[in-house]
Amino acid sequence: MNLAYPLMLFRLGLAHMVERPLRTSLTIVGVALGVAAFVAVRTANVEVLRSFEQSVTAVSGAATLEIVGHDAGLNETVITDVRRLPGIVSADPIVTIETRVTGGSLHGQGVALVGLDLIEMMARERLTVRRGRAAQELEGLLAADRLFLGPELASEWGVAQGDRLRVLAGLQEIPLVVEGILEVGEGARSIWSRTAVMDIAAAQKAFGLVGKLDRIELITDSSQNLEQLQDQVQRSLPPSAVVQRPDTRGRQVENMVRAFQTNLTVLSGVGLLVGIFLIYNTISFSVIQRRREIGIFRAIGMSEQTVSALFIGEAAVMGSLGGLLGALLGVWVATGLTGLLGNTITELYASVPRSGIGRGAGSLLPLLFQGGVLGSLISALGAVAPSAEAGKTVVVQALAPGSYDVVRKSAAGSAALIGGLLLACSAALLSGGPIDGIPVFGYGAAFCLLAGLSGLIPLSIQAMNWWNQFKKPGKADSGGATLERIASEQLTRSSSRSTVTVSALLVGVAIMVGVVMMVRSFRHTVEIWIEETVIADLIVTPQAWLQGSRANAEDRTLPSSWADELRHVEGVAAVDLYRDVHLRLGETSVALVSRDLRLHAERSRYLVLAGDSTTILREAAESGGVLLSEVLADRLNVKAGQGLELPTPSGLTSFPVLAVFYDYATDGGKIVMDRATYRRWWPADDAVTVLPVYVSARAQADRVRGAILRRLAELTPTGPGAAVVSNGELRQEILEIFDRTFFLTYALEAIAVLIAVLGIVNTLVTSVLERRREFAILQAIGASERQIQTLVLWEASYLGVIGAFLGIIGGIALSHMLIAVINKQSFGWTIQIEWTPGVWMLAVLVSVGVAVVAGYWPARWASHQPAVEGLRYE
């Protein structure tokens, strides 16, 4: 008996779903889209972070400490001194060369080649080489062109032992041979499955890094105090080297990546939120249509809880079906999204190798389970309120048409009061700071904003109806005005379901307006920054710098002597020497930029928070002071006029901070000093990263560019030389990266709006079903099919207008939250807001347009219903 009762409820709910396949399908598709967006972003985030972590920790293993150099790397003689220290069990030298495959189907594929003591690593990590080569047999195979790949990486690339590859590292194109495929035995770490390794001696020889190391991995005695041992090792190192925990290397970049991915995840959750509205709408409609059925259930003894459970169960079934479908769709979308997201993070933060998503049953089943559970949960959540009201149905009133809506309509004042309180709460939350780097209060403020505006919808519907009732139509348009009044009056009578529909559209429009305003403001700010800061007509740069490679310093630098050569090229007015290296301040890696600040003051400027840029730059050149980017100044809590200690080869040195400036090139922070100051404290580093070239006023940039290329060919007759990029090309590349970064944002917005459209279709279809008798009466007294269609389309357009009006208000407020709170706390950038009335007009057109399009099919359906059947309805 206990099992039969739930089974009976399940069959009742299933029968109702089957009887109304259109509405059931719309609901399932809406939930599926929301779950698909969330699953796709979450899966892609996990895969990208996994690839990033593997690339960072690929050779750390049991290492407890590591020694890293700055951009100049480490001299391998350091390892001899470190090995003599007490408490050091082993010290393993590492070089990492970031490369790109050239030619063939893998052209452009980036991979970080790790050079290490291959034989020792294989023995320690229980690795072998496919085809049974033993470790001792490898000694004759460690030539400078030999490469070993993990099995997953080899399978993904489609290469086998003996295949040849050509890779570009900086200015060098190196031919390599796949000598073997690593076999990962039991107990070995899985990260070796996606690793490309070379013996360190072979890597140093092949890439011109003899005597150079990137880092040294240390295994220490477990009985020793690690912090004391770390201090001891640090004292034995040159000032430019730093000893740290292995996880420190990836933690900073991972934190920045996490902030970027958190914002994407929250945005993908908007689809789930709109899906909740859709479920609410569906169950509300079901309750309205089944009043008599509910009354019968209550009359024969069914409890309130059982009635509520019937509708919640119905929603959960639709949600689980939508969740399963969404999970499948999400996994498919994630395969492409992973590459897009990985490329974006590579361009913004750090290199992330391509990663494939496992499609086996072992990886797919958990996602299907998660999708089904997620769909069920959001559906059950959306069904709670209407299901509870269904349980409270009074048997005597069950047959009274419209009683349900009357109760809901009378709550417009209360809903407006709650909405006002939520809006006040939203404003209060904006003052809260980030928690662990995440703008939790900012997200809470955004949620309260959207919920508060939703509370104002019933009042907005009534206000629109009042305006229509008191509007005086002219003689020529009295018929159309009558239809308008009927439509607005109908929305007022059914304000319960109209509120939920408009809420879904409101959220979609607000997110669209808010994010577009934020992106456009950000882009406008970046354009201003480029116009003010990137002034040089031409930039002479190594190939690795253009590719975003983070290879060793020699791959990313040019000889400073080239500046004198370029100054003698006809048409060149001035040449700057721009050096970009990285320093570690505590656990933070920051960019240290040096350049000719006097020349920069004459030709361009920095966007400083306070003061005159030209005066400050000249003062910095004369006094040896520095300028800090806004992000770094906030992170270190340093202001202009204070001092900043930097690690130099002579030890910690204090530099006066003369100004703080806006910078959008990096969110890790930047320090700027004069070239002469840098050479005084870092005398061993005479290289430059790029050479900005200013063309004389009478010269043509294209001709000067050609002359520079010819001169560079003379300077590097045996190599590919450097590249010469025009100012316009550099600006275009910066903005293209920017636009690619926000491509995902627009896609997620589109999903939210699409789900809202499904809600409008759902609303209007149900409205037509409920009002078949009303439409039949209108037809009986002479209403034409065209007038019936117009009436339904007026309802749809009113839904769009109210959604657009409140959505634009919400979008403007949301853009302020995104710019001033969420992005500021996540990344530290100050964005100048740009008011975009064109976006508001577009939002109105999109909102009303999608509402009318969504209402077209229900309108045609309503106009084609036979009047006789409609008069029999109810």
Image: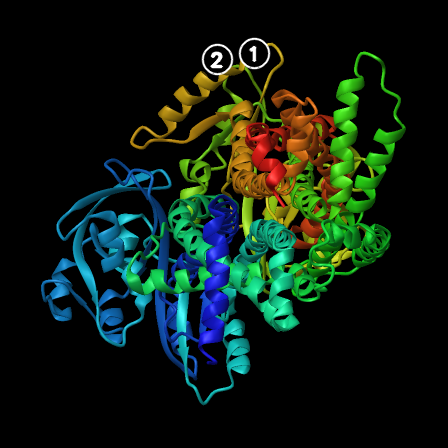
The quarter of the picture where residue 173 lies is: top left
Q: CA distance from mark 1 to mark 2?
A: 8 Å
Toward the viewer: 125 or 784?
A: 784
Looking at the rendering, which quadrant does residue 79 occupy? bottom left
Rendered view: 818 above or below 738: below
Measured from the top left, where is residue 597 in percent x and y? 68, 36
Residue in view at x 23 percent, y 36 percent? 104
- Per the image, the residue denoted by label 2 is 703
* Callout 1 crowding tier (Cα within 10 Å): few <14, some 14–19, many ≥20: few
Q: Looking at the picture, how far across and down is residue 27, in whole percent?
A: 52, 49
| Colour pattern | rainbow
How many numbered marks have been drawn onto this rendered protein structure? 2
Q: Amino acid at mark 1?
A: Ala
Furthest residue toward bottom: 223
* Residue 479 visible within the image: yes
Q: Decide which of 366, 785 is in the foreground and name it.
A: 785
The image position of residue 145, as x and y in percent, is 20, 50
Three-letter code, disc 2: Arg
Callout 1–callout 2 Cβ contact below 8 Å: yes
Residue 176 location, x and y as percent? Answer: 21, 47
212 left or right of 694 in image: left
Identity of the residue drawn at 12% across and 50% down: 162
In the image, is 830 to the left or to the right of 776? right
Name the secondary structure under disc 2.
helix
Q: Which mark is residue 699?
A: 1
**The furthest residue to the top:** 698
Badge 2 local density, few (<14 within 10 Å), some, or many (20+)?
few
